[in-house]
Amino acid sequence: MCGIVGAVAQRDVALILLEGLKRLEYRGYDSAGVAILSRDDRLQRVRVAGKVKELEDALAREALYGSTGIAHTRWATHGKPSFSNAHPHVCRGEIALVHNGIIENHEELRAQQLALGYEFTSETDTEVVVNQVHHHATGGKDLLEAVMDTVAELDGAYALGVISRSEPQRLIAARRGSPLVIGVGIGEHFIASDVFALLPVTQRFVFLEDGDIADITRQAITIYDSKRNEIERPIRVSELTADAAEKSGFRHFMLKEIFSQPRAVAETLEGRIAEGRVVEEAFGPNAASVLDTIHSVHIVACGTSYHAGLIARYWMEAIAGLPCSVEVASEFRYRRLVVRPETLFVSISQSGETADTLAALREAKQRGYAHSLAICNVPESSLTRESELVVMTRAGPEIGVASTKAFTTQLVVLMLLVILLGRRHGLGVEDEHALVAQLESLPGKLNAVLELSDQIQTLAEQFANKHHTLYLGRGSLYPVAMEGALKLKEISYIHAEAYPAGELKHGPLALVDDDMPVVAVAPNNGLLEKLKSNLQEVRARGGRLYVFADPAAGVENSPGVQVLNVAPIEEPIAPVIYTVPLQLFAYHVAVLKGADIDQPRNLAKSVTVE
Ligand code: G6P
């Protein structure tokens, strides 16, 4: 999704802005640009309909000097990816602006501005914002007032960075619905869509709240809320260091993140289990009294996080004995639904900024859910600030667009929640000990499964020229199959669909032939024999099977069947382990296809628009 960086400093800021954009590349984008006020107060702009590297090359040819500037990576919403749609947008050479979000009333504003004689050079919804700021500024207002008046007229979501030729030492930032942080320096200040962008220049941040407008100069940061009252927002010191977002010798961020799962899971568990039991306070000081009241659970999330919720539903009903429903956030937020009493609303989000998930949480608060709990990987994200209870996944920064370690750590937190709720609904101490022992065994088991990477790479070679594939699983391994299929389509662009294996004969079996490989996950559980019958149905139609199986599952290599043995793992924790070979499989197939692993086409890491 669009990324914003801005700076007001004493030194030249072009390289700081460029480095910030590089650090935001992981969010996904299609074009990039920068605008800088020169020392003689000219507004200079360079844009490219391509990657930040191309912007860097353009800046090498045409260096921009100046100490106030804004920069942007654009993920197209209104108007195709192109040079003229790239940000910053400039009005009459006076005001430059970058925007993340969607302005819903842009057509109405555009009509008003056309009547006032404004011209448009792009198809974006953003251009109306810069024109509107210009309109108010020419009415005698300073830049701060002009932005305040403008945002009061906007419907929709925005994070904005605005600079003006007539006030060269000033940067105005505003946010509603889209993320924006201020980086606090010494004699210089910055803005960005997230903290990673600014880690090389500061570790001190102010997180803007919805509706905030910030007046930023080299010496001061003054923040106003949506009612224009000056307010204080705390400065927080990030524990992240600049190298948190580096590849550390791995070829891709995704591979680094897959391989960091044993450590990430161990960190997620750290301090949250003691003497074989889950530590209740780890869910916050109010957790006990909240959880005491809960008799059902509704989980809402998007993408990979949604898949984590689907797995948790099997656990919640089987272990805690509580009814649990799971829904994608974009559906939940627009549906009339019946809220069961004493229901915990659980939102899951790696980024904590996904627009639909955030809106769902806000909606849930209106609709009378008893309590809310967020499972998130990014401290100080909007979701964590708005949810009643918060549990962090502690996976560390996840840069690859295709989510990996965030997913497995979400599962770990969800299991902790299931145990805490289960305790209140008949889960015995011995059973809790057994579950905790499974959780504690995860880092070691994950290390073992990572050792299969080379074998999985060999298997992947047979896939690189395929166009379609089916993924099968049963029970809690069905969402694992869904997650495996999602990984493959996200990064290799091979069409992959997941089915609960028992559904195969109700339609998808018609697709199976020699050219339609079928991937299955087969732990040694109560559904194994059923799954094996389903696999036979595939073989009988000439389909080729690739099975990730427990050695005791009795699935053998044979013509048309290739088996990759995964170390034995108990239920119910098996989904965490079986996810990993599917991540590696998608990764190796995508590498063989020469795809852009960390920034797959058309996708964004943090989806901050609806
Ligand atoms: C995007 C990402 C996915 C992610 C989904 C939900 O689509 O590309 O990897 O699963 O958003 O993101 P969240 O940050 O809410 O978990």
Image (tube, helix red, strand yellow):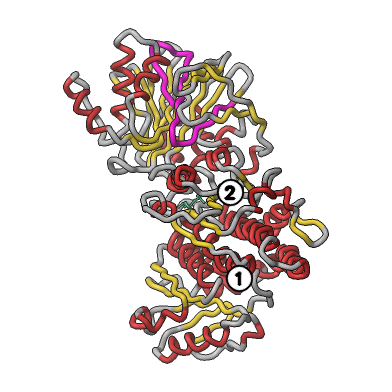
Toward the viewer: 272 or 291?
291
Residue 212 x, y percent position in the rendering: 48, 25
Q: Is residue 368 above or below residue 320?
A: above
Is 390 a magenta residue? no
Is 173 a magenta residue? yes
Residue 227 x, y percent position in the rendering: 44, 20
Look at the numbered disc 2 and give the secondary structure of its residue: strand
Look at the numbered disc 1 and give the secondary structure of its residue: helix
**What residue would you read off at disc 1?**
318
Q: Is residue 507 above or below residue 194?
A: below
Name the residue rendered at 53%, 68% in the picture.
480
**In the rendered structure, which segment of residues is drawn in magenta?**
161-183
Local packing at callout 1 (Cα closer than 10 Å; few below 14, some 14-19, many 20+) is some
| Total marks in image | 2
Label the magenta part by its dominant secondary structure: strand
**Could you say which quadrant of the image residue 91 lies in?**
top left
Q: Is residue 548 left or right of residue 93?
A: right
> Extreme right residue here?
275
> Extreme left residue here?
115
The answer to whether the residue bearing label 1 lies less than 8 angstroms from the nearest atom of ligand 1 is no
Give the amino acid at mark 1: Ala
**What residue would you read off at disc 2?**
373
Earlier-in-chain disc, 1 versus 2 = 1
